[in-house]
Amino acid sequence: MTPEKNFPTSSPRPLDSSRSELPAAGHANALSSTVPGLFDVAPRGNPTLAELLARPARVPESLLPGNMPDPFVLKLSDTSPGGARTAGAWLIATHNDAPHAFPLYRWSVERACFEPAMKDGRHVSLFPEDQLPDWWNQGEPVPTEPDLPRDLLRARWAPEVFEMGDQLVLFYTARDRQGILRSAYATSRDIGGPWTDHGPLDVNPKVKTLVPDYPGGPAGPNPVLGTIDGTVVRLEDDGSGRPRHALVIKVDGNALRWEDPATGRRRVAPTPLVAREFTLDADGKLRFVGTPNVILSNGPQHGGLVEGQFFVRENGHLYVLYSAGFFGNHEYRTYVGRLDDVMQGRVWNERLLMDSESPALRGAWNGPGHPSLEKVGDGLYALYLHAWREGTDYNRHGEQRRALRFHVSFRDTEGRPCAPFVVEDLQNPRA
């Protein structure tokens, strides 16, 4: 990947306003809208774009030891649920089949790092070991994937917490007792809990909704597909005066594979990203309104899937970051695209943001994906994602993804809007 895909080192390039429906890989602009309070508190001492670019390039270090896929950072303020006691940055990530689910890490200003959040000598988790929901898979097999390893069987994936009024809302993925991946949510008045789990959402489609000619298989003639990676988008004001939000999930069609009886060729179901507007009652009850909208489905450039979507609004536009390709090796990569209307439009002007050849990885990491952002300045964000150490992958070494942090800017060095770029791609390796 070359710097000019992200940021012009000479003449600044404005955001492309031409319409094109998903051109070839390597061409996109994106990010998207977020819930109020999520990104509006930047910690003191954050570097500016100029300061970041002036830093000498160095090999990225993992934020925490151990496996930390799908890292997500929530910034709480003094007025957030929990008050001043919980103000600051919190990190959570996927932990698969650990005895607890979604342990919390808190940013230490003094030590400038994330540390385990502790209470009574124990690491605080959103779901402690004795409070795991009963509907979660406890080892029951998956009819469509009978040979899944344990970490994928007891899936507890992609936690994301959003501040909505006086509630914190967690969206996450878990596999149910029938082996189906479900998008679910929980609510709390405090990041440290207790959390009330509201169970899986009714968003899982059947196969023939996406593939009418599916011939059937071990799970039946028309099985339910899994859904994963729920995230929230703040919608445009409709004049009602109330905040409007949408949940965007991925239909996990890439998990279903079969041989076409007519051609003998291997087929895989598509992986659409689906948006659904919702309301949240005072008691935490989520209700969908209107009709769902497919904002993106995997194309030939995506290696079989799109997932891990994250939204932010910048430069007057709504952008979406998302990943594609096999999660377990160098093929995983991150794109950025633009979206005009979450509930009616589709992603366009797609561009490769980061892949295994990105200079920011310094040849030490590969497979960067499942991005999330934390605002740290005007048009400047910390970019969190996971990657594999060079020379490792899932098939040979098991689950060993690490959480990394980079920066994405939507402004050039003179403060003008530009296409989003990874700042560390442009740092001078000889500075």
Image (tube, helix red, strand yellow):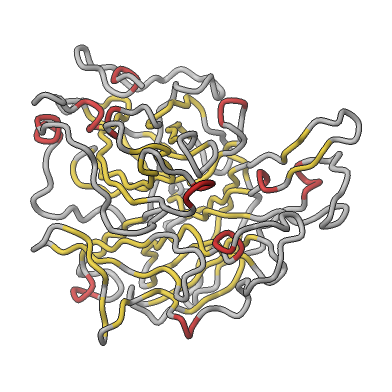
Write the residue at 76% across / 36% down: 267
Whether residue 3 is situated above or below residue 142 in the rendered picture: above
- Quadrant showing the C terminus: top left
Image-based side of 36 in relation to 397, left or right:
left
Whether residue 183 is situated above or below residue 265 in the rendered picture: below
Write the residue at 50% across / 63% down: 96
Q: Position of residue 360 (x, y in %)?
A: 27, 32
Judge by depth and name the residue closer to the eye, 394 or 104. 394
Q: Quadrant of residue 115?
A: bottom left
Image-based side of 99 in relation to 16, left or right:
right
Write the residue at 56% across / 26% down: 301
Whether residue 240 is situated above or below residue 58 in the rendered picture: below
Image-based side of 194 in relation to 113, left or right:
right
Q: For the image shown, how many numbered marks are present on the structure? A: 0
Q: Quadrant of residue 336?
A: top left
- Quadrant showing the N terminus: top left
Q: Position of residue 377 (x, y in %)?
A: 18, 43
Identity of the residue furthest to the right in this view: 262
Q: Quadrant of residue 317?
A: top left
Q: Position of residue 220 (x, y in %)?
A: 86, 56
Image-based side of 8 in relation to 140, left or right:
left
Write the residue at 23% across / 32% down: 423
Judge by depth and name the residue closer to the eye, 375 or 26. 26
Q: Position of residue 108 (x, y in %)?
A: 16, 64
Whether residue 17 is situated above or below residue 290 in the rendered picture: above
